[in-house]
Image (spheres, grey):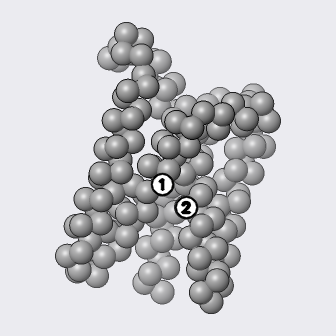
């Protein structure tokens, strides 16, 4: 597992892909929160988030070997699961930890500790699963944490 982690972040492109996903998630969440309270600024934030996601997929498309990917093949599904665990999960973990630390510092201790807890529990679960578990289980776990992130973010703003 340690070898996999060192290989995962050995190239700068993985860092860029994760940063673009984190930026997209952050701005989409801010946009959704603004739209929930009927502020039209939310559309601007959602557009900025779409720009980050578009940049991410443009960069990702430039990295892929187009001859290798065929429509409807099982390799595409494996690629999606790998993307969820190697690019999306680090972005989600960083968002949990950074936003948790921010809220912890500005005296919203309960909200900050909740985010930090979820931010530390996802890498712990992914590490405990290790390389022996199937990649789709890790991807599903990442998707569940994404739903938790949206729930925590939306609930924290209404409380």
Where is mark 1, residue-wise?
A: 22
Q: Is residue 78 above or below residue 96?
A: above
In the displayed structure, does residue 53 sit left or right of residue 146?
Answer: left
Q: Is residue 57 above or below residue 23?
A: above
Disc 2 crowd, CA 10 A, few/some/many (<14, 14-19, 20+): many
> Depth check: 95 or 148 in front?
95
Q: Secondary structure at mark 2?
A: helix
Q: Residue furthest bottom?
A: 107
Mark toward the start of the polypeptide (2 vs 1): 1
Residue 81 visible to an observer of this rendering: yes
> Depth check: 103 or 122 in front?
103
Residue 37 in the image, given as x and y percentages of width and height: 28, 82
Residue 147 in the image, given as x and y percentages of width and height: 49, 58
Where is mark 2, residue-wise?
A: 95
Image-quadrant location for residue 29: bottom left
Q: Residue at x 48, y 42 (%)?
A: 17
Q: Residue at x 48, y 54 (%)?
A: 22
Residue 142 visible to an observer of this rendering: no
Indicate which disc residue 102 carries.
none
C-beta proximity under 8 Å, tags 2 and 1: yes
Residue 9 in the image, given as x and y percentages of width and height: 64, 38
Quadrant occupied by the N terminus: top right
């Amino acid at each position: 597992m340690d070898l996999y982690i060192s290989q995962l972040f050995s190239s700068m492109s993985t860092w860029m892909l994760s940063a673009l996903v984190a930026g997209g998630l952050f701005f989409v969440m801010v946009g959704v929160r603004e739209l929930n309270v009927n502020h039209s600024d939310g559309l601007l934030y959602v557009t900025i988030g779409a720009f980050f996601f578009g940049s991410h997929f443009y960069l990702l498309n430039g990295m892929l070997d187009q001859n290798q990917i065929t429509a409807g093949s099982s390799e595409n599904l494996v690629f999606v699961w790998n993307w969820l665990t190697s690019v999306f999960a680090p972005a989600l973990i960083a968002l949990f930890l950074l936003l948790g630390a921010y809220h912890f510092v500005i005296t919203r201790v309960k909200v900050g500790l909740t985010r930090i807890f979820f931010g530390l529990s996802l890498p712990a679960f992914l590490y405990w699963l290790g390389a022996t578990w199937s990649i789709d289980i890790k991807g599903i776990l990442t998707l569940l944490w994404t739903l938790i992130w949206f729930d925590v973010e939306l609930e924290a703003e209404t409380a």
